[in-house]
Amino acid sequence: MARAIEVAWKGEGCTGTNPLVGAVLVKDDVELSSGAYSRFGGEHAEVKALRGKDAESGTLYTTLEPCVYHGKTPPCTDIILESGLKRVVVGMEDPNPRIKGRGNALLTKRGLEVVVGVCEDEVALLNPAYLLGIKKGRTAVTLKVAVSLDGRIAAADGSSQWITSGEARLDGKALRNRHHALLVGAGTVVADNPLLERSAHPDLPWYRVVIDRQGRIPSTSHIFGARDLLWWGDKSQDVPPSAERIEPEDLSDLLVLLRERGIQSLLVEGGKLGAALLERGLVDRLVAYVAPVLLGSRGLGFSPSTWATLEDGARLRDLSIKKVGVDVRIEGVL
Ligand code: AOF
Ligand code: ZN
């Protein structure tokens, strides 16, 4: 299963709203082949691992339960049943309501030995946004911040360029490649006039979700030239010709609406929006770049000003800590 997990990671960033899946075919304790789901709409991992191989009496290790219905591709259970496999070892059940145990049940019914829940915690790490989306019915949110050692994202006078090093900024930009969309507020667009592009996956849509309720963003902004824009703005305001207007009721509704449009993961890059989302319990993952700089206690923070007790606060789980240039990146789940 560890091998299947390793193989699954090959598809990172390329599978759109579908999960990362890896499969490994083993016979007589020897790995014969492997396959990864590596492109949205492409062949499933199990099919790739089994194609052209004599799998008779073998074991297939797959990180996710094999699918049972005709989607963009035929059901993996058909191919498994035709292959003559004896045993299928599954990392976790696929919570997709159209599958949810049916794949495993069908294979068991047809006489295969099916083992479910092997390395489940590691397997779940392949698809946090996919799993959260099904569980909570909304887009998964990552908040990225660049902070000083005393927790400030800007000095008291508002200046914030540049708190972290060039290495940390580059590392932070690469986070865009792991998400389906980026959320920005009018403040960021007006202050920085950014293009908000990303460096990878030119073939996949890259949505920029802009919140400008007071219509503050001038039509001369770079963002007006971008494609794939979703705009939550003031009704009387001009929006970019390519933008689609959205009208959610609130931030929580926005995340439901984004998931309905196939956006599974959303990156928020700092600022006021981050605090508003944190306050509502709508941040699932935090990535903080901490710089060895002190900015003073009147500097701007990024967490809710309404939190007062230790219980109000939030502690990160499943930490990963890495040195990036002279800064430290702390990533964790909320
Ligand atoms: C598998 N193996 O490699 C993947 C699975 O019709 P599709 O291709 O969009 O896929 C439909 C569903 O199949 C998808 O939403 C997810 O539940 C599951 N993905 N299943 O057996 C794979 N990628
Ligand atoms: Zn499948």
Image (cartoon, rainbow, N blue to C red):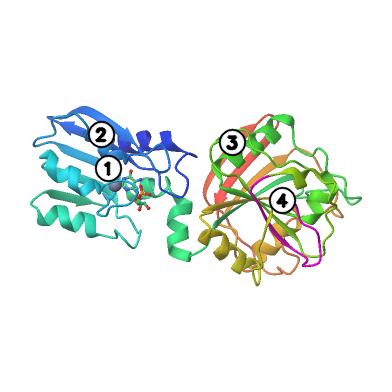
Q: Nearer the viewer, mark 1 or mark 3?
A: 1
Give the label on residue 97, or none: none
Category of crowding for the residue at label 1, using alpha-carbon neighbours closer than 10 angstroms: few (below 14), some (14–19), many (at least 20): many
Quick one: SS at disc 4? loop
Q: Quadrant of the C terminus?
A: bottom right
User: Is the C-beta separation of discs 4 and 2 under 8 Å?
Assistant: no
Sequence-wise, the earlier of marks 2 and 3 is 2
Question: What type is the residue that disc 4 sits on?
Answer: Gly
Horizontally, residue 107 falls left or right of residue 14, namely: left
Question: What type is the residue that disc 1 sits on?
Answer: Thr
Sequence-wise, the earlier of marks 3 and 4 is 4
Q: Position of residue 179 (x, y in %)?
A: 56, 46
* Mark 3, residue position: 322
17 over 105 or under it: above or below: above
Question: What type is the residue that disc 3 sits on?
Answer: Lys
Q: Residue at x 71, y 31 (%)?
A: 326
Magenta residue span:
227-241
Quarter of the figure with residue 37: top left
Quick one: SS at disc 3? strand
Horizontally, residue 291 falls left or right of residue 128, namely: right
Q: Is the stretch drawn in magenta largely helix, strand or loop?
A: loop
Q: Is the CB of mark 1 within 8 Å of ligand 1?
A: yes
188 over 202 or under it: above or below: below
Sequence-wise, the earlier of marks 4 and 1 is 1
* Mark 4, residue position: 270
Give the label on residue 49, or none: 2
Q: Nearer the viewer, residue 209 or 157?
A: 209
Q: Nearer the viewer, mark 3 or mark 4?
A: 4
